[in-house]
Structures are given as structure tokens and as C-alpha cells.
Image (spheres, grey):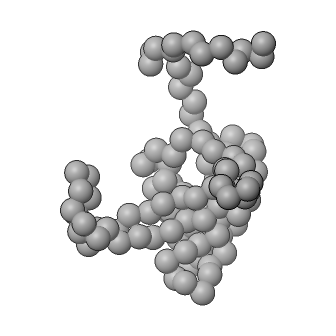
């Protein structure tokens, strides 16, 4: 019922979605490494996302210690002792760079 049966989907068959992302608003916080962001993703407004600038502490497979990386957190709701995202979409490095550029232009 409602397509809840697990079906194996090959990578070629998965839908490739081109996300059109615009930053509607960016609000600075007291911590200059955290920005509150309102996004518009393919016409859907996503409010109160958190864009964080982080510094890598240990060498990893992709990043080295001291590198600056960015993380986008989506709005979440606490249910019991756990938090669950209310909205989510896959964020590629290209999409994240576009968001960061738009945030910088709005804050400057």
C-alpha cells in the first residue's frame, strides 16, 4: 500500500533533479561563523536553515587539518529525544557554493 514495498532502483533509473536554489534572506548571528538562511528550492520556501563555517581538526580523506568547510543544516523538530529534519534535499558541492556566494553578497 502507498508504495511502501522496498524496490531496488538502479542508479541510472533514479530521477536527476536540477535544483534551482536562491537565497531569499540571510541573517547574521552573534557568532560570525553561523548564518541563518531562508532558501527557495524549486519554488518551495525553506526557512531557518543554518549555514556553518567549520575548521577541520584532523586530516581526513578529503580535507586536511585547518581547511575551512561549510555545512548546511535544515530545520528540525524534536520528537522525544531525537531530532528529525522537517525538509531535506541533497546538497551538492556546486549547490553549496552557489548558496555561499549568494549569502556573502546579501551580507555585504
Across and down, in percent, residue 75 comes to 69, 57
Residue in the foreground of this view, choosing between 77 and 23 = 77
Which quadrant is the C terminus positioned in? bottom right
Q: Residue at x 21, y 62 (%)?
A: 59
Q: Quadrant of residue 47?
A: bottom right
- With respect to residue 108, does 43 lie above or below? above
Q: Residue at x 78, y 13 (%)?
A: 1
- With respect to residue 99, does 13 lie above or below? above
Q: Residue at x 62, y 79 (%)?
A: 28
Across and down, in percent, residue 42 comes to 69, 40
Across and down, in percent, residue 37 comes to 65, 65
Q: Can residue 47 be seen?
A: yes
Q: Quadrant of residue 67?
A: bottom left
In this picture, residue 108 sits left or right of residue 62: right
Across and down, in percent, residue 86 comes to 72, 49
- With respect to residue 44, does 81 lie above or below? below
Q: Residue at x 24, y 56 (%)?
A: 60
Residue furthest to the bottom: 30
Q: Can residue 38 be seen?
A: no
Amino acid at each position: 500500500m502507498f508504495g511502501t514495498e522496498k524496490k531496488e532502483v538502479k542508479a541510472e533509473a533514479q530521477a536527476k533533479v536540477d535544483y534551482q536554489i536562491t537565497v531569499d534572506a540571510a541573517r547574521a548571528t552573534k557568532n560570525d561563523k553561523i548564518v541563518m538562511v531562508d532558501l527557495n528550492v524549486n519554488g518551495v520556501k525553506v526557512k531557518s536553515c543554518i549555514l556553518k563555517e567549520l575548521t577541520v581538526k584532523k586530516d581526513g580523506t578529503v580535507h586536511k587539518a585547518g581547511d575551512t568547510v561549510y555545512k548546511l543544516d535544515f530545520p528540525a523538530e524534536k520528537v522525544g529525544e531525537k531530532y528529525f529534519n522537517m525538509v531535506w534535499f541533497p546538497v551538492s558541492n556546486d549547490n553549496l557554493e552557489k548558496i555561499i556566494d549568494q549569502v556573502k553578497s546579501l551580507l555585504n
